[in-house]
Amino acid sequence: MTAPTSDDVPRADGMPVLGLGTWENTDPDACANAVATALETGYRHVDTAQAYGNEKSVGDGLAAADVPRDDVFLATKVWADDLAYDDVLESTEESLDALGVDYVDLLYVHWPARAYDPEETLAAFDQLYDEGRIERVGVSNFEPEQVSEAVDVADAPIFANQIELHPLLQQRELREHCAELGVEVVAYSPLARGGVFDVPELTEIAEKHGISEAQVSLAWLREKGVTAIPKATSEHHIRDNWASLSLALDDEDVERIDAIDRTDRRVDPDFAPW
Ligand SMILES: NC(=O)c1ccc[n+]([C@@H]2O[C@H](COP(=O)([O-])OP(=O)(O)OC[C@H]3O[C@@H](n4cnc5c(N)ncnc54)[C@H](OP(=O)(O)O)[C@@H]3O)[C@@H](O)[C@H]2O)c1
């Protein structure tokens, strides 16, 4: 099988549908290496957040890789404590500084919690959008009614909702709601933080194709029109996830995964809106 190149990654309205996650990749060298390795493998989408404490290392990886900055779709998130108007503007400048870039491709509201106030928070995001400091406005962990509210309140389009999504938490209603509003869905924890390796249906499909359960989960998400951002540190994992782009599941595989009837949420802080 030929290894996919960066040109092979489908895009959802400009966003590569497979990206690299970086939560808990806090060792500076390991994080910078993972980002550089991913970019050299062909990834063109990197996801970080203020709260991950690694924007500087992500920026170092971006600078180290032999890939022009403008070819990379870079996303970060404003933490829930920094969602008052001035705090959004200030903390975003700090993020840009740490990342070593003039703009990010996508800036998310990390959680609709704590200092989140739709009018005030999104007015600051609108300002950053108008100034060209962010190319797109995103939300994360928003429930259907909160997505609708954000779409109504913001002047800039709401580009994406980043949510936990994998075969053990399929989020059908939220996916449909986002599709109706023209909001892209980005799947976080697309490997269920390791949970996908322990699901008989996924193991059987993986064995049938001679691939990993990680690739099965990522191919299923792509089949659903969802962008996935698996976190990987080792080169082996980075490449394994990348190879999911070569995998086409058949209808029977997709139906089997669709039928997994579980609600197994891996990220559930006490301030979550659900
Ligand atoms: N918006 C939010 O609130 C939010 C919440 C959670 C996550 N996220 C974003 O989504 C990203 C992904 O989610 P996640 O980090 O929670 O979990 P995940 O991507 O579902 O799983 C990551 C785990 O799987 C391992 N792994 C990766 N590829 C593998 C492979 N091919 N085979 C075996 N193991 C593999 C990783 O190990 P190694 O690291 O050792 O390679 C790591 O332990 C985050 O990093 C972050 O960018 C956002």
Image (tube, rainbow, N blue to C red):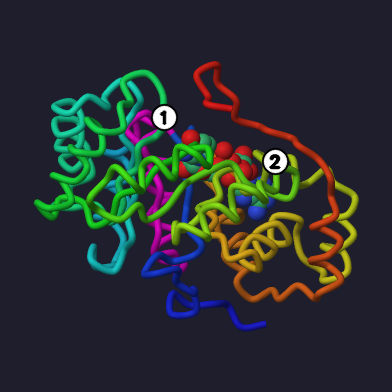
Residue 47 highlighted magenta (yes or no): yes
* Disc 2 within 8 angstroms of ligand 1 (CB): yes
Q: How many circles with numbers are drawn on the protein?
A: 2
Residue stretch rendered in magenta on the structure: 26-54
- At x 70%, y 48%, the residue is 170
In which image quadrant can residue 243 be found?
bottom right
Q: Eyeballing the image, is 35 above or below 244?
A: above
In depth, the one of 233 and 179 nearer the eye is 179
Q: Is-magenta flag for residue 135?
A: no
Q: Residues within 10 Å of mark 2 (few under 14, many from 20)?
A: few
Q: Quadrant of residue 4?
A: bottom right
Residue beneath label 2, please? 194
Q: Position of residue 69 (x, y in %)?
A: 23, 62
Residue shown at 76% from the left, 56% from the top: 213
> Tags 1 and 2 in contact by the CB under 8 Å rule?
no
x and y percent of residue 254 in the render? Answer: 79, 66
Foreground residue among 251 and 173: 173
Observer able to see residue 46: yes
- 85 on left or right of 67: left
Pointer 1: what residue?
A: 112
Task: Please indicate whether residue 130 sits to the left or right of residue 240 in the image.
Answer: left
Residue 210, horizontal then vertical, whole percent: 82, 69
Residue type at mark 2: give it: Gly
Q: Tell me what residue is drawn at x 81 percent, y 40 percent.
A: 262
Q: Amino acid at mark 1?
A: Pro
Dot 1 lies on which element?
A: loop
Residue located 40% across and 65% down the image: 15
Indicate whether 273 appears above or below 31. Answer: above
Instruction: Name the foreground residue: 38 vs 120.
Output: 120
